[in-house]
Amino acid sequence: LALAKQYTLPGLGILGLHVAEGKLWAADAVTRKIYRYSMDILPVPLDVLDLSPWLLPNSRVTGFVVDGPSLLFITDRPAQLHKVDLQRVVWTSAPKGRQDR
């Protein structure tokens, strides 16, 4: 198995990926954020969604899925399922990543 490319993604604890409509979604358990990238030749950072407003201070995101216009994510401490309407959230500009190899 040969590695074709490797990219550095922001965050400290990427817990999952989702790809839809040419966008890569990456969830970070540590920063409690969802990062979106366009998937051209290289992943290009698009924007970031901070999940903290919906979480208790000690909660940690443990998984997520995009279902049409909704983002569903699960947490521990306490175990909860959250559903967010993606048409009503505010995304912020993403930090710029870099291609490593």
Image (spheres, helix red, strand yellow):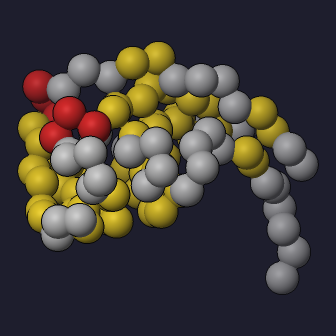
Position of residue 25 measured from the top left corner of the image (x, y, whole percent): 44, 47
Please tell me which residue lies in front, 22 or 79: 79
Residue extending furthest bottom? 1
Q: Residue at x 86, y 44 (%)?
A: 100
Relative placement, left or right, of 27 versus 66 is: right
Q: If the image is split into quadrants, where does the N terminus sit?
A: bottom right
Q: Residue at x 57, y 29 (%)?
A: 45
* Whether residue 92 is situated above or below residue 60 in the rendered picture: above
Regarding residue 67, the answer to whether it shows in the image is no
Relative placement, left or right, of 94 versus 74 is: right
Q: Residue at x 20, y 33 (%)?
A: 53
Relative placement, left or right, of 88 versus 48 is: left
Position of residue 77 measured from the top left corner of the image (x, y, whole percent): 23, 65
Q: Residue at x 40, y 40 (%)?
A: 33
Position of residue 63 measured from the top left corner of the image (x, y, whole percent): 33, 65
Position of residue 94 measured from the top left corner of the image (x, y, whole percent): 52, 23
Please tell me which residue lies in front, 88 or 5: 88
Regarding residue 85, the answer to whether it shows in the image is yes
* Whether residue 74 is situated above or below residue 82 in the rendered picture: below
* Whether residue 17 is situated above or below residue 49 in the rendered picture: below
Residue extending furthest top? 93
Residue 82, quarter of the rendered image: bottom left
